[in-house]
Image (tube, coloured by chain):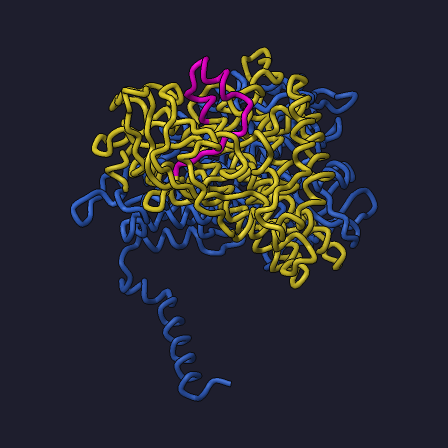
């Protein structure tokens, strides 16, 4: 039966995540926006509490790290038609609430990095045991290769004497790269062999060959550290290669890319959370200014501000429902690459659009640092960039609709 | 103040216009063909009395009005229609693509839907979905979702003919939702029978910034009933309709209400009002001058009116979603096959991204529409969800219509392809109030 409401069984999870957002994220929002690169110690206690709750399931689905991980058992019982609302939707709903609180702090929650999603997707049993539950960051982007991840130049050479891989290259934009315990590094076994030669390697943060070059100063999400590394003869045990060590032209890369089908809706969810924060605050301020929003009256018979607000809410709703659709499909094992990218494209651009319009609607209150609106407008922009830019999502959507390969539609 | 030259030009243009519209020109064979003239004449503003239709009479008395029960709250997020909905949607879509689409261009031109198609559409049970089973309805529970799915599927064939097919269903659903025992007993049997009457829900009025909650059409309470005055705009199948439901403000208050109006009486007339799009629905104006109605003509309470406006908007959303889907399905093969500069135009990002954005916005429109409809069925508040769906369908829908033409370039602007019609039709979703009901 068609129903697009939040499942009742996740209401408790949502309310708990909302409490964390209200009680811990919001009060620290401005502090760590201003104190970029200082460690938000308040999150350590929170992370410990979440670890403790993990078995209980309430917040276990609320962090990005639980994708395909331990949140999976969270009430994934199907109804009589075989319909499931499981860990993908639970994670998404939790993330929306936490991002409503502060997306920068969310991104630097201990042990919740996106690296765990990559590990969960391709690790074997032994690796899961060794790496599971640790704070893992992803190192994909290089100075010369962003969205075109097939073009990465970091090399991995196998040293048969020591049974180690030796990594050399440069990695930039590593979210939580300084604070994480593990860095999942993408490197190529053979630069001439294309995508199939690209493998992911788990590097311990304290590996002496992994040298922190610098931390970025950013437009937003300043609570979250963004690290640049140089890999200088960085040696990792052969057992730290995730997936198959063989160069298989058919597989390999696609496995890594499929991680995105699960993580893109989550990043879309972050944009939805930030945009909702903007809408709620703007509505409060507009209502104090005497603007009434009437859902029954046609847009042209209301004030321009009210009409603008309903227009923003409409796009927000479209983005939110597209994202829920992608997560629901993942829970029901339906292929969702297309819907994941549609959700990410719509939510990414809508988030930025709403945040900037809300700043304009609220005037100097929106633009000044006395309120959080200007911060949210800076934070939200990253969500239309990482995990695939707007343009990359449109490429994926267009190729799927038009039946084109990446060489036919560049 | 325009200068003399400008005023002179305006006078000259006015004269030219008068000359061009002089019927003598046609008599002397100065215009292209008699066929064209005849065609124009059929769309001219000739005001006629409404046609007296069948006599509606209750064959059996009801002790109380019948209502479809609600389905109740659902616990899980789910985008899969139930088996019955899937079956209905598929049969309607097959019908729409096989019958409506091929007839669409001629129906648009003629400002009328073929009678044969309207009859076949009735056989699909469109007017029975919203009617309680004990009164001959087809679906056990109240299901706005089912009507949305069927309307969307129908519009994939053609929006104008879909509107013509669905107009009587708006009236049967309104009577089912808000009619009292007498109104249901009198009118509903005809809508579940073999020969479904043409009927229309008339809400819109001809003026800018129209607001259905601020009506100019007035109903005065008089001895033994009401007297109605006002003008209703873009009423589907206005000339053929054998029954109207008319929105009017009661007793000079701003309180709007719905009135059941049988045509044929004094003071009621119609005139054709062909528009930019949805022409196959034979839209017209309904003019009410001192129309006397019995006291039993008032339908539902004040809450019913707000609900009626919202459910009508949802009906337009469903048509916009179906039409936008038709645009997407049409442009994909076109941009893949059309070559320029030695390769398919779809190999260019500007073209490919336009297609991607049509799909993204269309899916957003569809999901917002489904959510609102599902809240209706579950008995949850839905005013906000309808407003959001309508805004998306009005704005994104019209943009999709425009992109459809744009992707075909000059070919999109000529009638050889249906995209120019969809461009015209999709604008309706943000303009029209009433006419449909889910």
- Note whether B320 is above or below A368 in the view shown: above
Front one among B56 and A162: A162
Front one among B39 and B401: B401
Q: Does the magenta stretch include residue A128?
A: yes
Left or right for B355, reference A353: left
* Residue shown at the point (72%, 55%) measured from the top left: A285
x and y percentages locating residue B306 in the rendered image? 70, 42
Q: In which quarter of the image is residue A25?
A: top right
x and y percentages locating residue A142 in the rendered image? 36, 42
Q: Is residue A343 magenta?
A: no
Left or right for B91, reference B77: left
x and y percentages locating residue B282 in the rendered image? 48, 44
For the record, the magenta segment spans: A118-140
Label tally:
0
Q: Chain B is drawn in which colour?
A: blue
Q: For the view shown, which residue lies furthest in the top direction?
A: A80
* Residue shown at the point (76%, 56%) measured from the top left: A288
Q: Chain A is drawn in which colour?
A: yellow
Front one among B339 and B89: B339
Left or right for A231, reference A310: left
Image quadrant containing the C terminus of chain B: top right
């Amino acid at each position: 039966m068609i129903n697009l409401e939040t499942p009742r069984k996740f209401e408790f999870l949502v309310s708990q995540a909302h409490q964390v957002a209200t009680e811990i994220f919001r009060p620290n929002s401005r502090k760590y926006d201003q104190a970029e690169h200082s460690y938000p110690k308040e999150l350590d206690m929170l992370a410990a509490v979440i670890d403790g709750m993990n078995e209980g399931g309430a917040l276990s689905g609320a962090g990005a790290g639980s994708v395909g991980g331990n949140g999976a058992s969270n009430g994934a019982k199907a109804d009589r038609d075989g319909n499931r609302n499981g860990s993908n939707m639970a994670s998404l709903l939790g993330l929306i609430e936490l991002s409503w609180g502060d997306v920068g702090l969310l991104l630097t929650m201990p042990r919740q990095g996106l690296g765990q999603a990559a590990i969960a997707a391709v690790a074997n049993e032994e690796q899961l045991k060794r790496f599971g539950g640790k704070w893992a960051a992803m190192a994909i982007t290089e100075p010369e290769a962003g969205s075109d991840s097939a073009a990465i130049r970091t090399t991995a050479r196998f040293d048969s004497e020591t049974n180690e891989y030796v990594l050399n290259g440069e990695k930039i934009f590593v979210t939580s790269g300084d604070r994480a315990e593990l860095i999942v590094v993408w490197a190529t076994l053979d630069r001439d062999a294309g995508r199939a030669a690209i493998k992911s390697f788990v590097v311990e943060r304290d590996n002496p060959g992994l040298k922190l070059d610098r931390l970025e100063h950013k437009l937003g999400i300043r609570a979250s550290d963004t690290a640049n590394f140089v890999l200088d003869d960085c040696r990792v045990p052969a057992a730290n290669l995730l997936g198959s060590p063989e160069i298989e032209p058919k597989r390999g890369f696609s496995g890594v890319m499929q991680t995105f089908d699960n993580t893109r809706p989550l990043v879309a969810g972050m944009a939805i959370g930030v945009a909702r924060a903007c809408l709620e605050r703007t509505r409060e301020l507009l209502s104090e200014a005497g603007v009434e929003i009437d859902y029954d009256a046609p847009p042209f018979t209301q004030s321009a501000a009210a009409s603008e607000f309903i227009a923003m809410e409409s796009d927000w709703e479209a983005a939110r429902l597209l994202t829920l659709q992608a997560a629901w499909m993942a829970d029901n094992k339906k292929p969702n690459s297309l819907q994941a990218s549609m959700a990410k494209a719509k939510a990414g651009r809508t988030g930025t659009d709403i945040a900037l319009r809300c700043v304009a609607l609220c005037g100097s209150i929106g633009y000044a640092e006395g309120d959080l609106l200007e911060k949210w407008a800076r934070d939200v922009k990253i969500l239309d960039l990482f995990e695939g830019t707007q343009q990359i999502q449109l490429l994926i959507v267009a190729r799927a609709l038009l039946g084109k390969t990446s060489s036919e539609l560049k | 103040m325009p200068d003399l030259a400008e005023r002179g030009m305006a006078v000259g243009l006015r004269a030219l216009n008068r000359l061009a519209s002089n019927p003598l020109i046609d008599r002397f064979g100065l215009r292209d063909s008699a066929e064209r003239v005849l065609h124009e004449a059929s769309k001219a503003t000739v005001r006629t009395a409404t046609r007296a239709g069948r006599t509606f009479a209750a064959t059996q008395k009801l002790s109380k009005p019948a209502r479809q029960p609600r389905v109740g709250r659902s616990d899980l997020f789910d985008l899969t229609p139930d088996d019955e909905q899937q079956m209905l949607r598929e049969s309607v879509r097959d019908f729409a693509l096989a019958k409506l689409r091929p007839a669409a261009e001629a129906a648009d031109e003629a400002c009328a839907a073929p009678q044969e198609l309207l009859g076949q559409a009735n056989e699909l049970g469109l007017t029975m979905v919203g009617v309680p089973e004990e009164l001959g309805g087809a679906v056990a529970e109240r299901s706005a979702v089912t009507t949305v799915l069927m309307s969307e599927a129908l519009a994939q064939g053609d929006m104008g003919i879909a509107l013509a097919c669905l107009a009587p269903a708006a009236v049967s659903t309104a009577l089912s939702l808000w009619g009292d025992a007498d109104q249901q007993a009198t009118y509903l049997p005809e809508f579940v029978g073999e020969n479904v009457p043409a009927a229309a829900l008339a809400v819109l009025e001809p003026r800018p910034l129209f607001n259905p909650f601020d009506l100019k059409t007035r109903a005065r309470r008089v001895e033994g009933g009401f007297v109605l005055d006002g003008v209703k705009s873009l009423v589907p199948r206005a000339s053929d309709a054998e029954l109207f439901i008319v929105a009017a403000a009661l007793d000079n208050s701003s309180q709007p209400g719905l009135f059941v109006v049988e045509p044929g009486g004094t003071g009621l007339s119609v005139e054709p009002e062909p528009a930019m799009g949805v022409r196959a629905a034979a839209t017209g104006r309904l003019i009410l001058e001192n129309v006397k109605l019995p006291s039993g003509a008032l339908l539902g309470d004040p809450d019913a009116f707000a609900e009626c406006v919202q459910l009508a908007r949802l009906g337009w959303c469903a048509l916009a979603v179906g039409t936008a889907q038709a645009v997407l399905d049409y442009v994909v093969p076109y941009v893949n096959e059309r070559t320029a500069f030695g390769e398919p135009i779809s190999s260019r990002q500007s073209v490919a991204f336009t297609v991607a954005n049509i799909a993204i916005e269309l899916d957003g429109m569809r999901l917002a529409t489904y959510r609102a409809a599902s809240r209706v069925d579950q008995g949850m508040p839905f005013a906000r969800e309808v407003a959001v769906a309508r805004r998306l369908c009005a704005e994104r829908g019209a943009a999709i219509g425009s992109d459809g033409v744009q992707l075909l370039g000059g070919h999109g602007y000529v009638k050889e392809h249906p995209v120019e019609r969809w461009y015209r039709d999709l604008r309706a979703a943000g303009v029209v109030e009433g006419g449909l009901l889910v």
